[in-house]
Amino acid sequence: VGEGWRYPPLVLTKKEGRFYGRGVADDKGPLAMLIIAFKELAEDPDWNGSIVLAATVDEEVGGYTGLSYLLDEGIVAADYCIIGDGNIESIGHASNGCLRFRVTLYGKSVHSSLNWQGVNAIEKAAKLVTRLEEYNKLLQTRKSRVRADPASGVNQLTPSISVGVIRGGLKANIVPDRCVLEVDRRVIPEERKIDAVKEFKEILEDLKREDEDFHYELVSGGFHNSWQTPENHELVTTVKSAYEKIAKGPVDVLGSLGCLDAAYAAEHGIPVVNFGVSRVESHTHGVDEFAYIKDMMDFGLIIKETILQLLK
């Protein structure tokens, strides 16, 4: 949970119009309000149809045990899907996909005093990191047609790549014979997974041609597809109408730079949108994570109003 919390991170604290606690903004707050909204809808006769609340897990590890499993096995099915994940300041109608690479660089171990007789796997990894830094700048010149939240620093969904983990070496006086990099590649809706993998392999092969001692093993996986629901789709316009009725103001329809379980619904042909209770200042995943109580209440009311409009 991290250190330096002003309030107990695993105890819900109400303070000055906010709820504090680990996961309040992402994603316990939306789940709590969904449960309340469903309870109230169960007592409201003014709609026709059926609604299903799926409280799923493992999104952030790309796990198959959550929404993907429920949909693939036919346990749940739907004409519309709302993912209660995201911020309260916009409605999400698209998101980037996410592809993970694990690259193992191989070298030859020797005593560090004779390092010229070995091959340093960390040095080979450093070459790859430098090349990926250049590639990331190139990726960021590509722009999706889908608008992004300007608060993110870009106005359109943008692909990217970053090295998140490096593991290598045993002791300072041993030339390492192995180094592992874990890499995150974000894919815009206009890109294909197969092309992203191909480009990454080309970088590795270029380095191999330049350096005869560049030996690697590549494993790719953990893919979330990108997805997009048209802005003029009935689901999007209905959520927008419900939002503006409850919040008494306009709302943007934007794409997300992150990847979401919404992709699984889209893969099954289900129109999907997402929004939640967080804001930029909510410290999501950080110390003193919080959500505004009013935002949580509004989220629940928007969910109810959306369902009443869709199933009237």
Image (cartoon, rainbow, N blue to C red):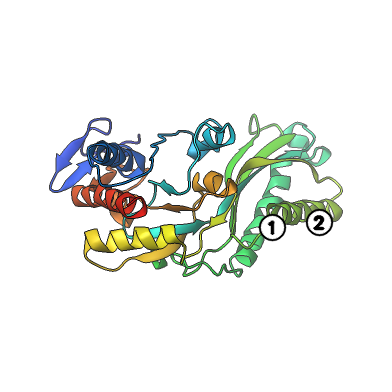
- Identified at 29% across, 43% down, the residue is 289
- Identified at 60% across, 49% down, the residue is 225
Please state which amino acid type lies under the numbered disc 1: Arg
Please state which amino acid type lies under the numbered disc 2: Asp
Q: Secondary structure at mark 1?
A: helix
Q: Is residue 293 above or below residue 169?
A: below
Is residue 100 visible to the viewer in this orientation of the structure?
A: yes
Question: Where is residue 79 drawn, in percent x and y?
Answer: 48, 48
> Mark 2 sits on what residue?
206
Q: Secondary structure at mark 2?
A: helix
Question: Where is residue 16 drawn, in percent x and y?
Answer: 12, 47
Q: Quadrant of the N terminus?
A: top left
Is residue 90 visible to the viewer in this orientation of the structure?
A: no
Q: Mark 2 near mark 1, Cβ–Cβ under 8 Å?
A: yes
Quarter-wise, where is residue 137 in the image?
bottom right
Q: How many marks?
A: 2
Q: In front here: 59 or 116?
A: 59
Question: Where is residue 245 drawn, in percent x and y?
Answer: 24, 62
Question: Where is residue 104 drawn, in percent x and y?
Answer: 72, 38
Q: Is residue 112 above or below residue 85?
A: above
Q: Residue furthest left?
A: 16
Locate residue 211 relative to residue 267 in the image: left or right.
right
Q: Residues within 10 Å of mark 1 (few under 14, many from 20)?
A: some
- Identified at 32% across, 63% down, the residue is 241
Q: In front here: 276 or 159?
A: 276
Task: Identify the mark at residue 131; answer none if there is no mark.
Answer: 1
Q: Residues within 10 Å of mark 2 (few under 14, many from 20)?
A: few
- Identified at 58% across, 41% down, the residue is 165
N-term mark: 2 or 1: 1
Quarter-wise, where is residue 36 in the image?
top left
Locate residue 100 relative to residue 198 in the image: left or right.
left
